[in-house]
Image (cartoon, rainbow, N blue to C red):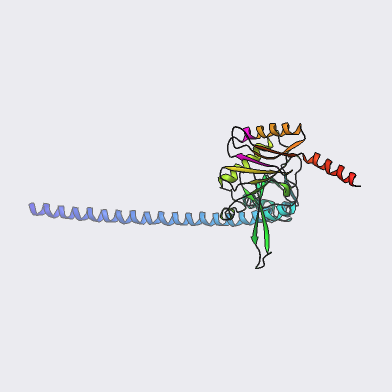
Amino acid sequence: MVFRAKRRNSKSGRKKLLSVKVQSQQAKRERLRWLRSLSALAAAIAGIIAVCWQGGAFALNRLVYENESFSVRQLDYRTDGIISVGQLKQWGGVSSGDNLLKLDLLRIKRDIELAPRVKAASVERFLPDTLQVRVAERVPMAQIWAWQRDGAGVTDYDCVRVQLDETGHVMSPIDGYSVVAPEKQAEWSLPVVSGIDLKELKSLAPGRPAGLPKLRAALGLIGEFRRSPLAGVVDLRVIDLSQPRILRVTTGDGGQVDLSTDRLGRQLNRWARIRAHGQKFGLAIETVDLSVTNNVPVRWMLSPTIAEDIKGDRNLAGK
């Protein structure tokens, strides 16, 4: 009996094992069928996307990027300064006939702002055919002249001139008129900053800010001067930086004025009072040292107007 029971159990175990194997194979076939179906579906979706992408790109090119209706016909460049429209167009790199929607506006803005003279630029497109560019220029406040050798001869020197705005940003000059001065001052007549060491001069490159402390002090003096009572009545010609802590100013009538690098507003007001006092007697300042606080030394000369009148009278008397 025991032996028969064992045989029955063995047969039952074999049947269960066969049943499990069959079920496992069926499940495997089912998974493979699903994987094949999913692969086919994914391939179909990818194909549809590729066709749509190619068709969309083709349609985009045909309807937008190759559409003559969006060709640039109006290039509207304007600046608040003196840079020519031709120069701005060259920096922008856009030509009539270019596709308006294909233009990289950020690239155009960046290329224009790389010019040292340009402070900021804005670029906009207006459908169907207009590109608008607006430019704000840097305002020249002073200039630096430097002579450098341009050959082997004794007289082979060339004058290199750079300009600076109120922040000390260095730029190359442009022939014309300054955009800043209310009196339409010619750019060549901007105050000249002299007395800078040659090694320091070589560090002044257009498109970069000047990092020289005394040069910034000279720019600060020009800014204070334009807000002082002397603006418009005294011609600021040269600012010499060769002496430590002193800004030596030469005026249009040949006067020489020394100022310290601090308390500029107070010194300029004192300069205006001294000048007004001399005018009462027909005198002009020949030299004055405003860097001292007490007992300011002043040397006087005849006012250029009176000196010219006396010279004219002498010429008449000689005749």
Name the side, left or right, on which 249 lies relative to 21.
Answer: right
Q: Is residue 128 visible?
A: no
- Where residue 32 appears, as percent x and y from the top left, is 38, 57
Is residue 305 part of the magenta span, yes or no? no
Nearer to us in this view, 239 or 210: 239
Q: Give the residue at x 66% y 43%.
A: 249
In the rendered structure, which segment of residues is drawn in magenta? 254-267
- Where residue 146 appears, as percent x and y from the top left, is 65, 55
Q: In which quarter of the image is residue 266?
A: top right
Q: Give the residue at x 19% y 53%.
A: 13
Q: Give the residue at x 55% y 57%.
A: 50
Nearer to us in this view, 95 or 113: 113
Name the side, left or right, on which 239 lies relative to 312.
Answer: left
The single residue placed furthest to the bottom in the displayed view is 152
Nearer to us in this view, 30 or 52: 52
- Where residue 212 appears, as percent x and y from the top left, is 56, 47
Name the side, left or right, on which 73 lies relative to 223.
Answer: right
As drawn, 80 above or below 98: above
